[in-house]
Amino acid sequence: MTTAVEVPLIETDALVIGAGPVGLFQVFELGLLNIRAHVIDSLPVAGGQCIELYPDKPIYDIPATTVCTGRELVAKLQQQIEPFAPVFHLGQQVDVVERQPDGRFRIASSRGTQWLAKTVLIAGGVGSFQPRRLKVDGVAAFEGTQLRYGAPDDLQALGGQRVVVIGDDDAALDCAIALAPLAQVTLMHRRDEFKAAPETISTLRRMRGDGQLQFVAAQPSGIVHADGRLTALQVLAADGTTQTLPLDRLLVLTGLSPKLGPIADWGLALERKQLVVDTARFQTSEPGIFAVGDVNTYPGKKKLILCGFHEAALAAFGAAAIVFPDTPIHLEYTTTSPRLHKALGVAPKG
């Protein structure tokens, strides 16, 4: 007889759903108001779209920063929130949000982690990101063995193999370029045009010209397999001809598709798959649940990181009124507040 193990509830003032730039800044704004937070994200690392979609591309509209990459922005935000010691729970998504009799929320994740939070702040961007999968009959059976969505962690493990890489952005081209000295690489996209950085495209074309890798302008149409192994990919070229590309490994880097996921089932007011909020506190239709960043909507909404930062500041004050219901919430300035200086670790010693 198996005895069920009860999962302990993690009690917290706030649970931030989403560890992208706006979610990270939300932690900072909560911290300034003495609200400690736990953070959950479906991705294995913090950073959201900045890390998954454009880690090395320049961003020019962050205040007081002439230019920074997505990776640099995330690193700076992580450094900024260090004084508040948030607890991260990555690689899992929130499946359940339930109001409890005492007004708090029970939140459960896909890994079985459970929280009891006074407030919930959804900074989930446009939803959790899932790889765009190949729509080819039978190919799903090889996922996790010969088929991988995304670049491999260990390039050396593919040494000497025939590898087909599908995609047209920086991630796909970088993967093909990095693998070329190690394996027999064929890059495939439906046309000979790419969305990558100009220098990356230039490197690819040079390597193609030198014969270091191959390129095929086509779309996948079928697979060839034998004895339980994927042996080739059938592709349809632009001229209507069918080719067969022998392979040992298939790497698909065709981007990520945002899915609102379980958020759509939490009973919150939605408009075109976005959470409706007020503009005083950025609270959703459920008191105590706030939404900031690309996941929300309101009149005049602009999907900019800058706007998400503004929303996070006001949402923090909305959360503070719930976390500290009997305490007046005063506006303090980081320039002059001794309390904030101490919280941030910048107070003079002595």
Image: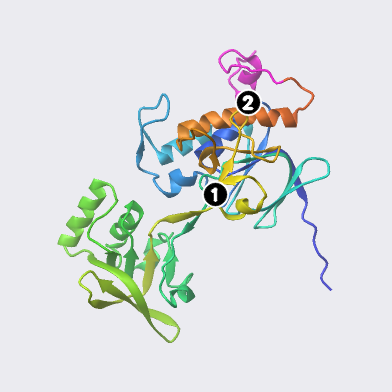
Please state the extent of the stretch shown in magenta in the rendering: 329-350
Q: CA distance from mark 1 to mark 2?
A: 31 Å
User: Which residue is disc 1 drawn over?
Assistant: 273
Which residue extends farthest bottom?
Answer: 227
Judged by depth in the image, the label closer to the viewer, 1 or 2, is: 1
Q: Give neighbour class at mark 1: few <14, some 14-19, many 20+ (Cα, 10 Å).
A: some
Q: Residue at x 37, y 63 (%)?
A: 156
Report the disc number at residue 32.
2
Give the side of residue 131 with respect to residue 165, left or right.
Answer: right
Is 244 placed above or below 114 here? Answer: below
Q: Quadrant of the N terminus?
A: bottom right
Q: Residue at x 56, y 52 (%)?
A: 42
Q: Nearer the viewer, residue 32 or 135?
A: 135
In the rendering, at what x and y percent does residue 46 appear?
52, 45
In-front residue for pair 212/325 = 325
Q: Nearer the viewer, residue 7 or 329?
A: 329
The answer to whether marks 1 and 2 mark residues whose Cβ atoms lie closer than 8 Å is no
Instruction: Examine the residues drawn in magenta and state their main secondary structure.
Output: loop
What is the residue that sits farthest to the left in this orientation?
209
Q: Is residue 201 above or below residue 220?
A: above
Q: Amino acid at mark 2?
A: Leu
- 330 up-or-down from 39: above or below: above
